[in-house]
Amino acid sequence: MKALVKRQYLLPFFLITSLFFLWGAAHSILDVLNKHFQNVIPGMTHAHSSMVQVMFYLGYFVMAIPAGIVIDRRGYRTGVVTGLLLYGIGALMFWPGAQIMSFNFFLASLFVIACGLVFLETAANPYVTELGDKETAASRLNLAQSFNGLGCVCGPLFGGLLLFSDAEGAESRIALPYVVMAAVALSVAIAFTRIKLPEIPHKVEKVDEATGSKLAHLLHNKAFLFGIVALLSYEVSEISINSFFINYVSDGGWMNPRDASIALSFGGLGLFMMGRVVGSLLMQHVGTERVLSICAVCTFLCTFVVMLNMGMFSLIALVLVYVFESIMFPTIFALSLRGLGSLTKRASSLLMMTPIGGAIGPLLMGMVADASSMSVAFIIPLIGFANVLAYAFAQRKEHTA
């Protein structure tokens, strides 16, 4: 069995993997903010509170291509340091935002954080895929992404205990987790300025003059375009479910928002992290395409059960969604980059535009929930998972052909 990471790349792998935790925490704490703003701002609807996700993931869409250009020209380390600085600045903006308690100021802060995360993810995801053999790329990225899952566990746990506390003044503590994240991000940025990350050499491929630039060349690659659609669909589904998990559980009367945030951390996102670890191991023995296909089928079925609103069965199905969806992002990402060579960095920046699905999905889901019910609103992630299922079957068919 081939080594997951080449020996000469072990240190860079561990350093880059530490970044996955940082953006996992930044993503998952949004799910607590969504419900928190509904509680503290009078008249805040599901659709209005989803602007937290809209502004955050809009940052991904706006900054993805500029981040790809910077990383393509200046290298992975420049991308990482730039991302950490923007992350830290955006997180620090929560402090003045908490003093004036302005929803719009918080949205601006989240936008800046997201711009930083685009640089981090555009650099880290493809870099991890290249620190070993191509055959183990998806498994290696799933292992690194398991630390993202750990950050996802800590985000709502820390945020939920602070913001849903019964203690007086709990609503004013919104800045505290972000100030902590800013301190960590800026400290790591300083560390990375003193560390040299080896650039992975690629065999430069001639790009046909008829297709022109790297961007045009990628847009003529049907397999890559299908990967973008699948990843966008996954983002719509995954972020929509995270955004309204606390609403679904608390509105259903199973637990209060504080307990629901803890359930999200350990029940949902904890299983999400474990799923990535187990998935990484399975892919080394079963095959990447087969694991993705099985998980896509199970995720679609579980989401359908949630939409049927079958009481405890639906709640169990909701938790199981986190297990089966866990391997989707890193697996689709790795499969989409397979064989792109010198186009990898630019392709990665295009793939990092797909989190715009996090702006679309929660907004649509919130509108459906306001018009009908939270369970019916799960039709939005169901459609997204159907697209992922189609991609998984196409990849498996191509692999076995």
Image (tube, rainbow, N blue to C red):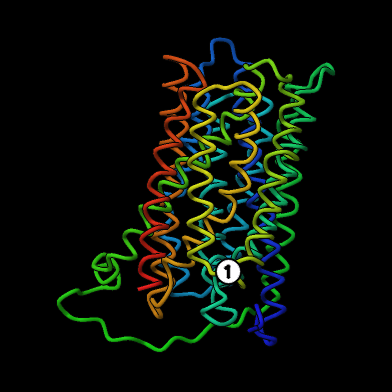
Snapshot quadrant of residue 398? bottom left
Q: Which amino acid type is shown beneath numbered disc 1?
A: Val
Q: Nearer the viewer, residue 363 or 41?
A: 363
Instruction: Relative to 253, say whether 33 is above or below.
Output: below
In x, y percent, where is residue 208? 20, 81
* Left or right for 125, reference 33: left
Snapshot quadrant of residue 217? bottom left
Instruction: Relative to 372, say whether 136 is above or below.
Output: below
* Residue in the picture at 35% in, 52% down: 229
In x, y percent, where is residue 391? 38, 56
Q: What is the quadrant of the C terminus in the image?
A: bottom left
Query: Do we see residue 101 in this rendering?
Result: no
* Residue in the picture at 68% in, 87% down: 8
* Residue in the picture at 83% in, 16% down: 168
Looking at the image, the residue that sits furthest to the top is 43
Query: Do we see residue 70 in this rendering?
Result: yes
Q: Which residue is mark 1?
A: 286
Q: What is the quadrant of the N terminus in the image?
A: bottom right
In x, y percent, where is residue 88? 65, 50
User: Does dot 1 land on a helix, a strand or a loop?
Assistant: loop
Looking at the image, the residue that sits furthest to the left is 210
